[in-house]
Structure formats: C-alpha cells, structure tokens
C-alpha cells in the first residue's frame, strides 16, 4: 500500500521534529524528570508538528524504556500506540465530535485506570471547534482530572478558545518554518527516496508550503518526477517569480501592451487570476522591504531574487509601491464579487501602471513620488555624465615659451559727431496769419428772436398714475409698487422644517419656489402648475403653517400662487430694516 510522504515520514521522536527545538527540548525534559502537566495546549499554523508532538508525547510518557525523554518505539506499549491496538491513547477530532455528549463520554471514561499504559492520554485535535456547552463540560474535568489522565489539545486558532480553558493548560506555540528549514527536510526525504530534484524546484516547493512541512511534502509528490523547473511550475499552476518580475518592470515602464498580453496569456492558460494578484502583492512587499534597506535575511529569498528585486526597486518610489499594494489589496477583496475577473485584473494592473486613471489621494501621492524618482535619476545621470566629461576631457598642451613683450594699451575709440546742416531762408517759420484762423468781427454774431411761450403750454411734469399688474393666480393683495411686499429670506429654514414631515414638499419649496410676505400674509410662488397643485393641498398648507410656527412666525396667512417674484417686488426696490420687520416679531 502506498503511503503519502507526509505520513510515511511523520516524526517518531522529538529529535525528528523540524524547527521546533524550543518546544521539543522542554517536553523532553519534563518526561525525563517526571514533571508532567495534566493538560497541554499546542497552538500553531497547519503542518508545524502539533499533532506529531502530541503523539510522540503520548508514547514518551508511557514508554517502558525511554531514552533521554524520547520514546524507544520498540517496546510493547510504543508499538501498540503506533498501530492503534492500545486504547489508552485516544485521538479525537473536535471538528466532528464537538457536542456536549462527546465530552460527557470522556468525563465518564477518565475515572477508569488505563489497561496497559501508565497514563490515559486524550489528544483533542482542532479543539477550537467545540461548542460552548462542550467547553463548559470540559472545564471542570480539565481543571482537576485524575492523576492517570493527560489532555493534549491542539488548535490552529487559539483566539477562539475560552480564557478559562487557556488558564488550565501549559501552552506551547509552534512557529512557522522558514524556507531553509523546509528545504533541508525535503533534501533528506529525497535522499531516502533516491530521487533527484533541482535546487530551484526545491526552493519553489518550500516557498509554496508557506511554513508547513506537511504541505511541502504534499507538493513535492506532484513535482518529484518533473524534468525541469518550468515543468514543475506548469504542474503546480504558479506564475513564477521571473514572470512576476517582468510584469513589475512593465508596470514601472508603463508598458500597457505588455500588461494586456500577460493577462491574456494567463487567461487562456486557465491560470487563477486571483493567485496572480496575491503573488504580485508578495513581489511589491519584497520591493518595499528592499527599498527600505531591510536585511535580506528577512525576505528569505535566494541571492538571484535579491539582485532582481534591488534592480527593480530603483524604478519605483516609496509612494508608488504603497499605492500598488493598496490597489492590489482592494482588487483581491473585490475579486470574488467581480462578474468579469479578467477585466478586473486588467483594470488593477493598468491603474497601478498609470495612477492618473485613479482619482483618490493615494494615486496623486504615487504620481508625485514617481516624478520625484524620475527627477532623482535625471540628476544622478547628469552628474555622472558631467563627471565622465571632466574625466575624459583632454589636457591642454603647454605652449612653447616665448619672449615676453611689452604690450601698449589700445587707444579708446573716438565718437564722431554728425555734421551740422547749412542755414538757409527755408528754416524761418511763416508769420502767424498764414496758419491761424482769422479773428471773428462783430458782424459775425447775429441776433436771434425767441418767440414768447403761451400760458397753456407752460406745465410741469406730472407723475404717472400707478398701474396695477395683473396676475392670474396671485392674491388680490398683490400691489403695484413693490414697496409693501418683501421676499421671504428664511424660506430655506422653513423648507428644512417642512422636510422633517414631508421630504418631497420640503425639497420642492427649497429648490423650485420663492415666497413674499406683506404684513400678516405670506404667498408662496410656484414655477408651474404641477408645483402649484402639489403645494395647494390641505396637507401641504398645514405642514407649511406648522413650519412657520416652529420658526416663530405666528399668525400669518399662507397662500399659494403661480408667478414670478418680480411681479411683487421690483428690481430697484429695497428691503425694510430687519428690526422693523413684522415677520420677525417673537411671541
């Protein structure tokens, strides 16, 4: 029967566990010194060795011949626990056994002593999946279990476990493994399997494992027969760092054609575009780290990748990298809801390449940072070119020594004055009589007789009689001179008060109506018949009256008319002093 690699090479001793020395050393010392706890809690991400350490601990505490706290795996008890024939060690999956009755069954069983082993060990995997009632049932048992019972709880989400459970357990946090630790473990397994895989493929597998040894072995089984690195990439469905660096370079150069060709290639290759978004986010994260002069060991990348990232980071500013990461995060969150994932991916890359297409502040900062980065490159290149010119400039050849001669100062140029013209009679001006008009004599003025005015023609201008403007729908109180009617300047406040009861009426008054008042009468003027009909309803008039009272305008008669405010108030009329205005009298 074929066993998966992660099952075939599961650690059997504490020393076989990869990258968790801080935990295995403590557990080994506890077993060797017989200082065991009644409950353990193993926390960490998937594939970091939680369940393996729990099984090793269950054999170590029951082993008949332990060696330095390690199980021998040769005695009867160790073999029985390994093949499952000894029922004193129980492994329970809390994801499928999360009810109160399952915990009650455990509580009823623990009162009995173990059959063959020294301790009864209960390994509860994914303990955070237990229900609230199950946790309450487990609480008392976990606090004071019998001396022959040990609980080992394992979880990937420790924040979901109640604090009352956490306080009763010894907690051990399993760390995520580095790419180097996983790569070393892969090389050991390949040597045992007599297989050969190139270094780039091994590093790719270790990177995709994301800190999990179990995931790395599952991925290794897919590519262990791959001929080349490119074939391994095709089998795993990844895009590859080389292509991602190329697309990041195209973004920096604003090569939109390359971006569309890249998405087109991924789309017709049936690649997951959301995976591309995530991998490109990882590339920009590395660029930000390199740009910030972070230690290269933090990136956990090969030297080839570090060199490529440093060369690429010179083309980006801090602001552009941060803007790109924000845009990628936004695209990743909305990708699952997008009806056209191809268009969403294209839009994301184009927005990163050309921040001018985006209108938020981050894009503006990215554009400014990009210009600053380009200006720095221009200045640096200019300094370098001028330095090269100075370096390559030929030295002047020394002139042959000559006998020194005394030089006389050059004479100053003499300014030549233009010659004066000869004087003749034509230069004498003529007498004034030839170019001035003649002086008028007394005969030039003639007497004009003005006829006297008749008495009936003598009159003073009289004022025109006042004309009363006709208004079809206005009130009879509308007058002609415009002095007695004033515009209601507080219409906006009244409309806001009306809006609380009738939003449509309030918007109508605020946007399409004006109002005038005279003594104790207010007329609301409408633009058209539709507005007039809407406001003339009894409900509308009642709402307007209530709004007037709310604004401390009491005792006013409300009317509605169709017309223009200029029919009531002339353009040249002035408003009365507000202190003398009766509309602002308070009750």
Image: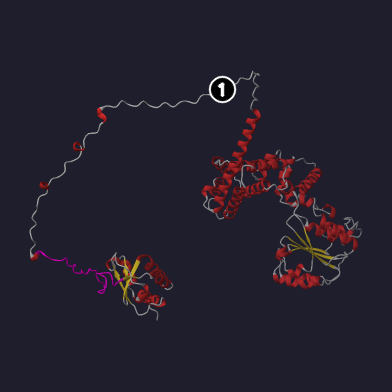
Label 1's element? loop
Q: Is residue 319 visible?
A: yes
Relative placement, left or right, of 315 versus 203 is left
Q: Is residue 392 magenta?
A: no
Residue 456 locus on image (x, y percent): 8, 66
Q: Is residue 471 magenta?
A: yes
Question: Residue sitting at 25 percent across and 28 percent down?
Answer: 425
Q: How many marks?
A: 1
* In the rendered image, the vertical position of residue 119 relative to residue 245, given as above or below: below
| Nearest to the observer: residue 36 or residue 521 | 521
The chief SS type of the magenta part is loop
Identify the image quadrant of the C terminus. Answer: bottom left
- Residue under label 1, please give it: 408
* The one of 584 and 38 positioned closer to us in this rendering: 584
Q: Say above or below: 307 vs 121.
A: above
Characterize the local packing of mark 1: few (<14), some (14-19) or many (20 or more) Cα atoms within 10 angstroms: few
Where 128 sits versus 380, above or below?
Answer: below
Q: In the rendered view, does 532 fall on the left or right side of 437?
A: right
453 to the left or right of 521: left
x, y percent for residue 13? 85, 54
Residue 83 visible, this angle: no
> What x and y, as percent, mark residue 334?
57, 55
Q: Quadrant of residue 565?
A: bottom left
Stretch in magenta: 457-485
Q: Using the rendered view, name the quadrant where residue 235 is placed.
A: top right
Q: In the image, residue 262 lies at what x, y percent?
A: 58, 42
């Amino acid at each position: 029967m074929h066993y998966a690699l992660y099952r075939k090479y599961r650690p059997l001793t504490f020393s076989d566990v990869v990258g968790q020395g801080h935990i295995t050393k403590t557990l080994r010392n506890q077993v060797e010194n017989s200082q065991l706890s009644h409950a353990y809690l193993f926390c960490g991400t998937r594939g970091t060795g939680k369940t393996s350490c729990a099984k090793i601990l269950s054999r170590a505490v029951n082993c008949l011949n332990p060696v330095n706290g390690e199980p021998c795996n040769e005695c009867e008890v160790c073999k029985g626990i390994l093949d499952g024939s000894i029922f004193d060690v129980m492994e329970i999956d809390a994801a499928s056994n999360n009810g109160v009755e399952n915990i009650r069954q455990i509580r009823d069983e623990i009162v009995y002593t173990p059959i063959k082993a020294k301790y009864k060990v209960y390994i509860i995997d994914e303990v955070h999946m237990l229900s609230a009632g199950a946790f309450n049932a487990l609480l008392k048992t976990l606090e004071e279990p019998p001396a022959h019972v040990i609980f080992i709880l394992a979880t990937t989400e420790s924040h979901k476990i109640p604090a009352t459970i956490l306080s009763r357990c010894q907690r051990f946090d399993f760390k995520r493994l580095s790419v180097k630790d996983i790569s070393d473990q892969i090389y050991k397994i390949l040597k045992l399997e007599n297989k050969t895989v190139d270094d780039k493929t091994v590093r790719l597998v270790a990177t995709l494992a994301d800190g999990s040894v179990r995931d790395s072995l599952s991925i290794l089984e897919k590519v262990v027969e791959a001929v080349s690195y490119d074939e391994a990439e095709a089998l795993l469905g990844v895009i590859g760092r080389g292509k991602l660096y190329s697309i990041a370079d195209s973004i920096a150069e604003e090569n939109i054609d390359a971006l569309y060709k890249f998405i087109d290639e991924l789309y017709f290759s049936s690649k997951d575009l959301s995976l591309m978004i995530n991998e490109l986010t990882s590339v920009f994260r590395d660029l930000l780290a390199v740009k910030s002069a972070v230690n290269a060991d933090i990136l956990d990348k090969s030297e080839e990748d570090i060199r490529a990232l440093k060369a690429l980071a010179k083309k980006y500013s801090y602001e552009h990298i941060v803007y790109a990461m924000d845009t990628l995060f936004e695209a990743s969150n909305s990708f699952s809801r997008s009806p056209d994932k191809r268009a969403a991916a294209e839009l994301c890359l184009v927005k990163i390449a050309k921040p001018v297409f985006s209108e938020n502040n981050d894009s503006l900062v990215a554009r400014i940072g990009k210009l600053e980065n380009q200006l720095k490159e221009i200045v640096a290149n200019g300094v370098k070119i001028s330095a090269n010119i100075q370096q390559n400039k030929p030295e002047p050849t020394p002139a042959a020594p000559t006998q020194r001669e005394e030089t006389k100062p050059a004479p100053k140029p003499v300014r030549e004055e233009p010659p004066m013209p000869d004087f003749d009679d034509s230069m004498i001006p003529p007498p004034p009589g030839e170019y001035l008009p003649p002086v008028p004599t007394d005969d030039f003025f003639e007497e004009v007789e003005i006829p006297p005015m008749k008495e009936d023609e003598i009159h003073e201008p009289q004022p025109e009689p006042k004309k009363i403007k006709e208004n079809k729908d206005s009130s009879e109180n509308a007058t002609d001179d415009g002095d007695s009617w004033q515009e209601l300047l507080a219409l906006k406040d009244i409309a806001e008060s009306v809006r609380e009861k009738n939003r449509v009426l309030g918007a109508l008054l605020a946007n399409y109506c004006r109002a005038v008042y005279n003594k104790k009468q207010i007329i609301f003027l409408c633009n058209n018949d539709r507005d007039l009909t809407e406001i003339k309803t009894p409900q509308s008039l009642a709402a307007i009256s209530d709004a007037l009272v709310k604004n401390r305008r009491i005792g006013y008669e409300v009317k509605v008319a169709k017309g223009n405010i200029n029919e009531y108030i002339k353009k040249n009329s002035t408003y009365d002093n507000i202190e003398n205005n009766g509309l602002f009298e308070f009750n």
